[in-house]
Image (tube, helix red, strand yellow):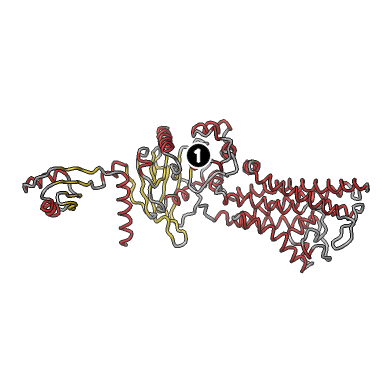
């Protein structure tokens, strides 16, 4: 398995698209963290608390949701790209055991996702601290909390990378997989989370963002953003839920991948 | 000893039967042409042999095992298949690095195969910038990377210019001389005729024939062209003898299912002057078309 993961990692390192998705994740994190920091302390709808408060600063340092979505996108690319570019034949000629190939791809996507989460977490933290320093505020969050937020982003993005790999293997269509990830995370979860606050903590993207310290619903778009009600799952429960989702997708994708012809 | 064994292989895609109870064997150390018109089932057969497509019935084995069961498959079998490609955004060298890692081959081997297929100058270019011919060469480099004893090549001449076809022919001859088993598919017999020991001809998923080239040529009727002032009289006599004769112009006949000797004796017996007799050499392509058309007629008659 180690060799298979090394192969997949080498494939990923020699594809420009992986670096492009990482750069997109970093750029979006920088943009949204800066926007949140700029409007911190202002009044109005969806106001952000001032940066000298723990709530205000954490709103900025936890803008890591994009890294999770884009980690899933990368996961989709890692698996579905084999079919899009007709490279699956070469992959399965080298390693006919398709389950092991999928497992290696999932681990690789998870590893790449962890990098996405780390980069995003560090950027968001840096943006928050730069704005705090620029205003001459004291840092309202302890080092432990900041590190926990970054670690949560790493865990959340890693699992989302694995989930993306499962989605890509299941659907084989890169376009459908990528669109599906965005629509699920940005539209469907926002709608369901807004309508049924009791199920909100169990929604995968929402659960992943709460791992990184984002308040429940804080990463939702539209009317569902900041809808009150309910609390996040404990870290371990949220992580277990997400790993369960990834494992379920992997199991289903594994069955379909073994059965389907590579033509 | 047979290294490739196809036994009663059947594959259906929905209502379409791509391969229909196909059986044949390929002996070790031989170079075999795998021929048939487009849609004959060649690629499906090869993909089934390589474990990429699951058969509905029968089996396709290499060295007595399914491809999936081969230890170190890249060291046993090298394959170039249609509709498979290296990732277009990766350089040729990086593509081979991935394959070398999969086959546990040293990086020095990458340079060797790049040199073998004349791709060293383009090794650091992205595959997406390659011409079809260059991709075919890279495919061959990939197949040869782990020095396999069996090569399965699906339409390797596609996209090659005449010089490239000659290069491929020389390469296949070289591989055959090294004692490797090569199964090379094509829809053009002439592409492989100078290289192969025998041919397997497929049509609509059925085996049409598995022969050496000499046996194949001998099975097909030659055509005689005869110039005589009494064409119609000679035609009647030949038909009475069981030959097929067609008057193409008032003084010219085309005859099959006979021979120059028999026609000459018959004409002498009836005092019919013959001014010219020529025998058309039957090209390999004619053989191929006659066999596949005969198979098609038989299929339609069912």
Q: Which residue is mark 1?
A: B134
In this view, the residue in front, A118 or A15, is A15
The quadrant where residue A5 appears: top right
SS of the residue under disc 1? helix
Residue nearest the viewer, comparing A22 with A101: A22
Q: Residue furthest front?
A: B250
Q: Position of residue A250 (x, y in %)?
A: 64, 55
Percent x, y of residue B235: 14, 52
Q: Quadrant of the N terminus of chain B?
A: top left
Q: Residues within 10 Å of mark 1 (few under 14, many from 20)?
A: many
Q: Is residue A205 in sight in this rendering?
A: yes
- Is residue A14 shown left or right of residue B144? right
Choose between A99 and A150: the one closer to the eye.
A150
- Residue at x-position 43% and y-position 54%: B58
Position of residue B279 measured from the top left corner of the image (x, y, whole percent): 21, 43
Number of residue marks: 1
The residue sitting at the bottom extreme is A195
Would you say A203 lies left or right of A78 here? right
Residue drawn at (9%, 45%) of the image: B273
Q: Is residue B77 visible?
A: no
Figure quadrant of residue B27? top left
Residue A64, percent across and down? 78, 52
């Amino acid at each position: 398995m180690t060799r298979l993961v090394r192969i997949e990692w080498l494939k990923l390192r020699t594809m420009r698209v992986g670096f492009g998705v990482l750069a997109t994740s970093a750029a979006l994190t920088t943009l949204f963290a800066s926007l949140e920091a700029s409007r911190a302390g202002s009044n109005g709808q969806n106001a952000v608390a001032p940066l000298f408060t723990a709530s205000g600063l954490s709103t900025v340092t936890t803008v890591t949701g994009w890294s999770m979505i884009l980690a899933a996108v990368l996961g989709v690319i890692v698996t579905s790209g084999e079919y899009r570019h007709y490279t699956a034949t070469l992959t399965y000629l080298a390693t006919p055991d398709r389950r092991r190939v999928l497992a290696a791809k999932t681990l690789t996507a998870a590893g790449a996702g962890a990098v996405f989460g780390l980069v995003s977490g560090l950027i968001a933290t840096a943006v928050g601290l730069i704005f705090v320093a620029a205003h001459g505020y004291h840092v309202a969050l302890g080092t432990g909390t900041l590190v926990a937020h970054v670690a949560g982003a790493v865990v959340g993005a890693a699992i989302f990378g694995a989930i993306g790999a499962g989605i890509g293997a299941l659907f084989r269509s890169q376009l459908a997989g990528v669109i599906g990830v965005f629509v699920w995370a940005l539209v469907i979860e926002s709608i369901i989370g807004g309508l049924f606050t009791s199920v909100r903590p169990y929604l995968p993207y929402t659960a992943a963002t709460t791992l990184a310290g984002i308040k429940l619903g804080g990463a939702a778009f539209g009317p569902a953003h900041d809808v009150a009600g309910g609390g996040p799952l404990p870290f371990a429960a949220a992580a277990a839920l997400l790993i369960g989702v990834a494992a379920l997708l992997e199991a289903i994708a594994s069955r379909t991948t073994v059965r389907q012809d590579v033509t | 000893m047979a290294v490739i064994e196809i036994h009663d292989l059947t594959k259906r895609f929905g209502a379409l039967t791509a391969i229909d109870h196909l059986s044949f064997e390929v002996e070790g150390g031989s170079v075999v042409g795998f021929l048939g018109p487009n849609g004959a089932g060649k690629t499906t057969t090869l993909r089934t042999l390589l474990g990429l497509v699951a058969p509905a019935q029968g089996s396709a084995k290499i060295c007595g095992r399914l491809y999936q069961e081969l230890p170190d498959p890249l060291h046993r079998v090298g394959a170039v298949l249609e509709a498979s490609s290296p990732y277009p955004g990766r350089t040729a060298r990086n593509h081979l690095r991935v394959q070398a890692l999969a086959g546990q081959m040293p990086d020095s081997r990458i340079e060797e195969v790049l040199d073998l297929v004349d791709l060293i100058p383009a090794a650091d270019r992205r595959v997406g910038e390659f011409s079809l011919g260059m991709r075919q060469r890279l495919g061959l480099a990939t197949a040869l990377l782990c020095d396999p004893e069996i090569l399965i090549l699906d339409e390797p001449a596609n996209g090659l210019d005449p010089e490239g076809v000659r290069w491929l022919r020389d390469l296949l001859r070289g591989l055959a001389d090294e004692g490797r088993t090569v199964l090379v598919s094509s829809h053009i017999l002439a592409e492989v005729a100078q290289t192969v020991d025998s041919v397997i001809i497929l049509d609509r998923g059925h085996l049409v024939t598995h022969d050496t080239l000499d046996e194949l040529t001998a099975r097909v009727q030659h055509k005689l062209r005869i110039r005589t002032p009494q064409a119609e009289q000679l035609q009647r006599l030949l038909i009475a003898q069981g030959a097929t004769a067609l008057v193409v112009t008032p003084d010219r006949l085309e005859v099959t299912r006979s021979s120059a000797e028999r026609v000459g004796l018959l004409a002498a017996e009836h005092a019919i002057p013959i001014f010219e007799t020529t025998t058309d050499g039957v090209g390999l392509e004619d053989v191929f078309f006659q066999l596949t058309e005969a198979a098609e007629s038989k299929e339609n008659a069912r």
